[in-house]
Image (cartoon, rainbow, N blue to C red):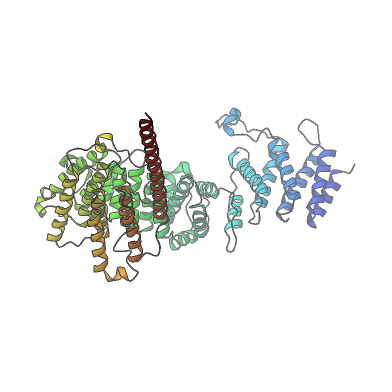
Amino acid sequence: TLPPSLLVDCIRLFARHGDLRNAFNGLRNFDRVHPTTDDDGADEETRRHKLVAYRILCDAVGETDMNKSYVKDVVEYLHRSLSRSNPDMTCTARRPYLQKAEDEEKVEFSHQTKMAQVCLPRLLLALCKPNVRRDSLSRLAVQVFDDVYRNHHIFPFDPYLYLGILELNFSPGRRPSEFLPYHFILRRLVEHGTYPSSSIAIKILQREYPYVDTMRTTNSIIQSFITLYQLASQPPQQQEEFETEHSNQNHKPMNDVLRADYLTNRIDLGLMEQLCNAGASRGSTQVVLMLWDLSDLLGYTPTEGMYEAAIMAFLNSSKKQDESALAVFNEMEKSGYTPSGALIRSMAGCIGISPGRIDNTFYMLTNYGSAERLGLNISTSSLNCVIAACSKQGFVDRAFSTFTNFPNYNQQEGGIQPNLNTFEFLLEVLATKACLLTGQTPRNDFDKFQKWKNKASPQVSDTLRAKDSYSMEALLESAEMLLSIMEQAAMEKDCHCLHQYVSVLAYAGKLDQAMELLTTYLKSNKLALEGNGQGFILMDTFCVLTNQCMFHGDLDRAKKVTKMILTAGFKSIPPILTRDIRSYQQQARFENMKNQQRLSSQEDGNDSSSKANQDE
């Protein structure tokens, strides 16, 4: 039996020469020969030597190649000895005697807990090195981090520990480890008044986004950035006032070097816009609003993409904040931005889910009391949102009543004038209604802002599917009327208007007229014949016409339409069209075979009956 001092010298010697395996064997022999618990009556010298032995081995782990197989056994043994079998390493809420009170005496921890206070942070720093790539060590590092982070009563805040972790992983030329929650580390540092450099903070944001499943991580990082830039943008005197107002957060003043660092290295505006789009797609209004506050701190002017993201965030949120979305939409127009057709179509995809939501939007825009309370102004783009929402459900009456009342709004400025998007959405209403009259379901294309893109289309009531007062002839007359109004206003129809008009003709069964229109349009555009026609005729136009040709049983015309796709300048025919045509041909052959068998069976029956009559 060796004395504790000699065992410690042996462990130090092995660790100094990089022999972690023999150092680990020496530590296990130490634990077996000199077990030190609170009940065995061990002397203080043995406990002190054991603490030194554990500290040496934890430091030796960081100097060893992590890819070696026995490193996992060493880390598991250290973690089990220091943390897993420790009764004090539990959540603070489960230990009522550790709750803070004025008359409470200081809790005396066990020797094992005192060893954990010294050794677990060292082990955590060893495991946080960027060369850790093994999954088993990554899981152990996360467990050690949780033990250190959550047990505040055992491990007081150590800024050098957390700053050391960040500097190890985010120094220039290093690839950070993939398992640590760096947003927790950044938030803990900011809460206790220890601020990392701006380059490290921005790298944490770039590393965490967009490789997270939820917006909680992004939310936590943005909160930390708001606090950092608030401190950096204020002089030291105002920082002291800021600290007194928020004394529970322990924000200490930022020194001049860090202030200059944060004012020089700011978050890129493109990254903030991308973060806004991510929050909008998931309906996180909190993240979007915090990013707007951060842009004000940095002196940025909100871009068009940030306005669009805020609008879609309010529409996609669980509370369906349509009034806030319309307010941001109005502010976007006041800032000089013109809402694009893609934004209006995205808004219509949310508003057009139900008729009640469409009526509510129209009421907020046209009612004087609600419009004045929300600060809304009626414009062509805002009314286009209502018409586009009606096009999702095929509400012809509501769409055209909104269109006919354009001159009645803003009469002091001469009324509201329709634009090209207005006629496009009106033609889309007619196309949707024509599709419903044929008994088919309209295909609503939602763009990237929509959270419904992977779900089913909005449910259309059975009453809309029934043939009502609208006939195909009336829909065609309305489409011709809209085209004549566009010609009188000197508006040239673009590819979207052409697509909707061809859809109306195709659903109405006017296949010859639709093909003639496309042929004429191709001949009138020389660029289309030169292989650059994607901007003149959409691929969806050919797809709709091909499907309706097969729906009306004209396979030859459907094949001619697919050949026109190559003439329009597209490089290939979509595989879905070729599969549909092939399946339609197989179905037609199967139906022909069934009809032939039915006719042959009838002829055989007639022959047998005639022969029986002759025999009689």
Question: Is 129 on the left or on the right of 300, as rendered?
Answer: right
Quadrant that contains the N terminus: top right
* Extreme residue in the right direction: 1
Question: Is 585 on the left or on the right of 61, as rendered?
Answer: left
Residue 499 sits above or below residue 324 on the image: below
Q: Residue at x 16, y 41 (%)?
A: 367
Quadrant that contains the C terminus: top left
Q: Nearer the viewer, residue 271 or 400?
A: 400
Question: Is 184 on the left or on the right of 334, as rendered?
Answer: right
- The quadrant holding residue 247 is top left
- The quadrant holding residue 389 is top left
Q: Nearer the viewer, residue 546 or 342?
A: 546
Q: Please state the total of marks drawn on the protein image.
A: 0
Q: Nearer the viewer, residue 317 or 463?
A: 463
Q: Residue at x 22, y 49 (%)?
A: 382
Residue 372 seen anywhere in this rendered image of the structure: no
Q: Residue at x 9, y 54 (%)?
A: 414
Coordinates of residue 352 in the picture (x, y in percent): 28, 42
Coordinates of residue 597 in the picture (x, y in percent): 41, 41
Residue 228 seen anywhere in this rendered image of the structure: yes
Coordinates of residue 35 in the picture (x, y in percent): 81, 36
Coordinates of residue 263 in the picture (x, y in percent): 43, 61
